[in-house]
Image: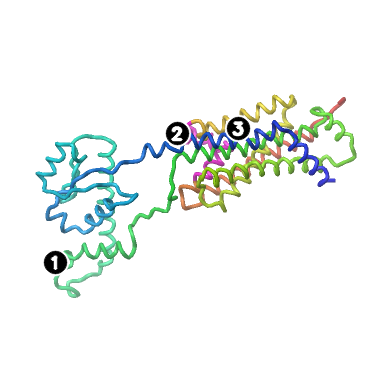
Amino acid sequence: MFFHNLKYALKTLFKNKILIFWTYAFPILLGTFFYMAFSNIENSEKLKIMDIAIVKNETFEKSEIYQKAFDSLSKEGENQLFHIQYVKEEEANQLLMEDTIIGYVLFETEPKVVLKASGEYETILKYIVDEIVQSETIIQNIVEKKYENFSQEENQNLENFYENLSEEITKVLEENGLPIKDNSSKNLSYTMIEFYTLLAMTALYGGILGMVSINQNLPNMSHKGKRVSVSPTSKKTIILSSALASYITQLIGIALLFFYTIFILHIEYGNLGYVVPLLFVGCLAGLSFGIFLATAFKTNENVKTGIVISFTMLNCFLSGMMGITMKYIVDKNLPLLNKINPASMITDGLYALYYYDTFDRYYFNIQSLLLFSGVMIFLSIIFLRRQKYDCI
C-alpha cells in the first residue's frame, strides 16, 4: 500500500502545473536573470595594472626578497599588478608630480611608500608593501630559528653569515613556499551568494510540496482527506508515502536547477561531494516546514501557500538574496537570527565550502538544518495526533 500511494502521490504532484512551475521553472528563470544581471559586475570592477616606480638604491639591490616579490608582481600575465620603473629618487619624484605613476617605493631602513594622493590604488600599493614587509619578518624568524644554535666556533665569520642571510631566506622560500598559503577557491566571487540563496529558496519552496501533500490527506482540507480518514489504511503509511513523494519531487527540482547553473551558467560551487548532502538536508528542512504548516494551521490552502512563500522569501532576504551585504549586516548585528534561519544555514554552508578549507562551519550548518527539520517533524506529529473531527 505504501508504494501504491507513493506512485499516485507523485502523479498528483506532477499534474499540478502551477506547483511544478514554482518548483521547477521559476528557480531556473530567476537563476538566468541573476546570471544576466551579475555576470559583468566583477569585470567592470576589475583592478587595472598600476604604474609605480621603485627607487633603485643600494638597500634595494641588497634585498633579494623585495626584488623577487616585485618581479613576480610585475610579471606579464593575468595576475600582473604593477608596471614598474626602476629610477633614482629625483626621477621618481618627477614622475609622481607628473601623475605618470600613482606612487613609488623608497628603500631605506624599511620600505617607504611615497604617494601624491589617497585613493583605491594607492591604498592597495601601501597594503601590498606592508604585506611583503610582514612576510620578510616571518621568513627571517624562520631562518634565524634554524640557526639558533649557531656558534662562533662553527663559523668564525659572523659578518659573512648575516651578509648571506638574504640567500638563506630565498632558499627557505624555495623549499617551503610563502608562510601564508592561499587555500581558497581559484574563482572567488562575492556574487556567488546570490546563487547560494537561489538554491536555498528552491530547497525551502519544497515546503509548498509538503504542505499540499499533507493537505490532501487531512479530512478538513480535501475530499480525498475525508475518504482517507474513514479508510482502513494506516494513516502513518499514507502520510509517510505522501511526504516521500513530495521529497522526491523536490529533489528533482533542485537537481534540475543545480545542473542548469553548473553546465549552462558555469557556476562553480566547489566540492560537489559536500554540496549535494547539504542540499539534501536543506530540502528536508523545507519539506518539514511545509508539513508543520499543514498540520498546525487550520486554514485554506491558499493562505498556507502564502505563508510558505512569505517565510521563504523573508529568510532568503535575510541571507542576502535581495542584497549581498544583508547577510553580513545580520551576522554582525543579529547573529542568532541567522543561526535559526534555514535559508541562512544553507547559504552559510555553501559559503563555508567555497571560501574555507576546513569543514567545522559546514558541519555546524548541516547539524542545524537537521535539528530544524527534527523540531518541525516533532511538532507536526503532535498536531496530527491532537486533531479530532466531530463532523467532516
Marks 3 and 1 close (CB-CB < 8 Å): no
Q: Which residue is mark 3?
A: 312
How many numbered marks, from 0 up? Answer: 3
Residue closest to the far front: 264
Q: Which residue is mark 2?
A: 325
Which image quadrant is residue 204 in?
top right
> Nearest the camera: 165 or 144?
165
Task: Examine the structure image and report whether residue 267 is included in the region drawn in magenta.
Answer: no
Picture coordinates of residue 299 (x, y %)? 74, 24
Pointer 3 local density, CA inside 10 Å: few below 14, some 14–19, many at least 20: many
State the SS at label 1.
helix
Please give the name of the residue rendered at 52% of the width and 39% of the height, measured from the top-left corner. 195
- The disc, 3 or 1, on the residue closer to the chain's N-terminal end is 1
* Residue 144 visible here: no
Read off the magenta span: 323-351
Image-based side of 300 in relation to 284, left or right: right
* Residue 68 visible here: yes
Q: Closer to us: mark 3 or mark 1?
A: 3
Residue closest to the far left: 90
Q: Main secondary structure of the magenta part?
A: helix
Marks 2 and 1 close (CB-CB < 8 Å): no
Pointer 2 local density, CA inside 10 Å: few below 14, some 14–19, many at least 20: some
Pointer 1 local density, CA inside 10 Å: few below 14, some 14–19, many at least 20: few
State the SS at label 3.
helix
Picture coordinates of residue 49 (x, y %)? 28, 44
Please give the name of the residue rendered at 83% of the width and 45% of the height, measured from the top-left corner. 4
Residue flagged by tag 1: what amino acid is it?
Glu
Image-based side of 360 in relation to 67, left or right: right
What separation in Å lies between label 2 and label 1 (alpha carbons)? 55 Å
Please give the name of the residue rendered at 13% of the width and 49% of the height, measured from the top-left corner. 87
Is 170 above or below relative to 268? Answer: below
